[in-house]
């Protein structure tokens, strides 16, 4: 497993946090995702053999948020 920290823009409430958490945890290869509204970031543990960090960023952006 590899851990990554992703900065997220555009979150305004706990509903956004739930949305992003659901998007990330539904991806094959993601072991865990902790999304923080206050810190505007997500800590994600994932299998780099199953998906890339870029795929994580793309999933967040597809959900309507900014990710870097």
Image (spheres, helix red, strand yellow):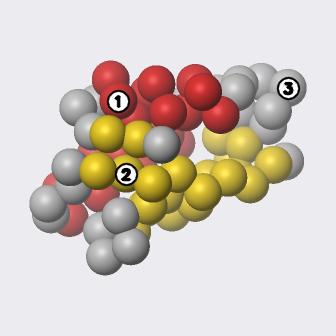
Query: Disc 1 or disc 3, which is closer to the eye?
Result: 1
- Kindly report the distance in space between the C-alpha atoms of the residues bearing marks 1 and 3: 21 Å
Give the mark nearer the N terminus: 2 vs 3: 2
Q: Earlier in the sequence, mark 1 or mark 2?
A: 2
Q: Distance of mark 2 from mark 3, alpha carbons?
A: 24 Å
* Residue drawn at (45%, 54%) of the image: 7
Please report whichever mark, 1 or 3, sits nearer to the chain's N-terminal start.
3
Quarter residue 43 falls in: bottom right
Instruction: Examine the rendering and report whether any part of residue 22 can be seen.
Output: no
Q: Secondary structure at mark 3?
A: loop
Say which of marks 2 and 3 sits in front: 2
Coordinates of residue 20 in the picture (x, y in percent): 35, 45
Helix, strand or loop status at disc 1: helix
Question: Measuring 27% from the left and 39% from the top, which residue is drawn there?
Answer: 65
Note whether 22 is above or below 40 in the view shown: above
**What residue is disc 1 on?**
61
Name the quadrant containing residue 39: bottom left
Q: Position of residue 1 (x, y in %)?
A: 84, 48
Numbered disc total: 3
| Nearer to the camera, 62 or 32 | 62
As drawn, the residue found furthest toward the left would be 12
Image point (85%, 26%), residue name: 49
**Between marks 1 and 2, how big is the CA–CA gap?**
9 Å
Left or right: where does residue 8 sit relative to residue 58? left
Is 60 left or right of 34, judged from the image as shown?
left
Q: Which mark is residue 49?
A: 3
Q: Is residue 68 above or below residue 49?
A: below
Numbered mark located on residue 8 in the image? 2
* Residue, far front: 68
The residue drawn where x is 39% and y is 35% is: 60
Vertical placement of residue 37 versus 52, above or below: below
Q: Is residue 15 left or right of residue 60?
A: left
């Amino acid at each position: 497993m590899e851990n990554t920290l992703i900065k997220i823009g555009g979150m305004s409430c706990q509903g956004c946090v739930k949305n992003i958490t659901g998007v990330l945890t539904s991806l094959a290869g993601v072991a865990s995702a902790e999304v923080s509204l206050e810190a505007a970031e997500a800590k994600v543990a994932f299998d780099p053999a199953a998906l890339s960090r870029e795929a994580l960023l793309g999933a967040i952006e597809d959900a309507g948020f900014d990710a870097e």
